[in-house]
Amino acid sequence: MTRRILIIEDDEETREFISRGFAEEGYTIETAENGRDGLYLATDGGFEAIILDRMLPEMDGLALLKSIRAAGLTTPVLMLTAMSAVDERVRGLRSGADDYLVKPFSLQELLARVEALLRRPQEQSETTLLTCNNLEMDLVRRTVRRGTRDLTLTPQEFKILEFLLRRKNRVVTRSMLLEGIWDYHFDPKTNVVDVHISKLRKQVDFGSEVPLLQTVRGAGYMLADA
């Protein structure tokens, strides 16, 4: 079985060095060169392990790691850093890192450490129930409930709500939705996102005192665990 590894590293030479080494060992590699793109890929899921640089542009490695764990992802994360101080390693481990490796490093040691992480039993299997306040989505039964009320969603609305639930309490931009749901890697200048969000909001928040699906003006949308 092919294993997918995400490498989040801003230094091009280091990123390519790691990518080549893991690809030669049969891994499927995806990469990001900044924290923002790294977080987007990481929270999209499907990776067996993440190799994360400590110092990144646009979003610091520690902040990225905390966001990954806050999203409920248990993917093993090995953090790379040029900082060798014990306190720095402790900060990384307490933020959710599973292992720590100081630069410069041996590729063989990095491979061995990642293989060791992959041999560890996962603390929990991938969740099949996504929640936000009293909103529940069962990914196995393909059902959605808000309190005692069953929601009737179209397949597209289900996909959008799942996308938002996996990123609850974080702003999701129109671009993220266009790419993640419709596979548009450009802005088609359409109101398709707004139309679907409007219909979804009527389903999610109808008759509820606490609105969950919020519009963040000038930024996007957020499913807030109010």
Image (spheres, rainbow, N blue to C red):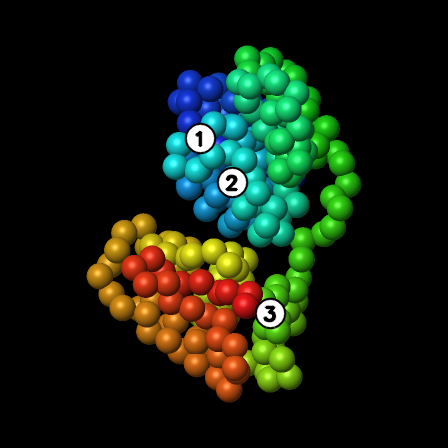
The correct choice, above or below, for 143 with respect to 218 in the image is: below
Q: Quadrant of residue 33?
A: top left
Please tell me how crowded label 2 is: few (under 14), some (14-19), or many (20+) other residues with Cα within 10 Å. Answer: many
Is residue 191 shown left or right of residue 14? left
Lower position in the chain sequence, tag 1 or tag 3: 1
Q: Secondary structure at mark 1?
A: loop
Do tag 2 and tag 1 residues touch (Cβ < 8 Å)?
A: yes
Cα distance between the residues tagged 2 and 3:
24 Å
The type of residue carrying mark 2 is Leu
Q: Looking at numbered disc 3 in the image, what kind of residue is underneath it?
A: Asn
Picture disc at residue 56: 1
In the image, taking residue 96 as reference, residue 6 lies left or right, namely: left
> Relative to 198, is 103 above or below?
above
> Residue 196: x and y, percent?
37, 72
Q: CA distance from mark 1 to mark 3?
A: 33 Å
How far is disc 2 from disc 1 in space, using C-alphas? 9 Å
| Residue 159 can be seen, yes or no | no
* x and y, in percent, of residue 180 in the image: 42, 55
Front in this rendered view, residue 71 or 121: 71
Image point (52%, 44%), residue name: 42
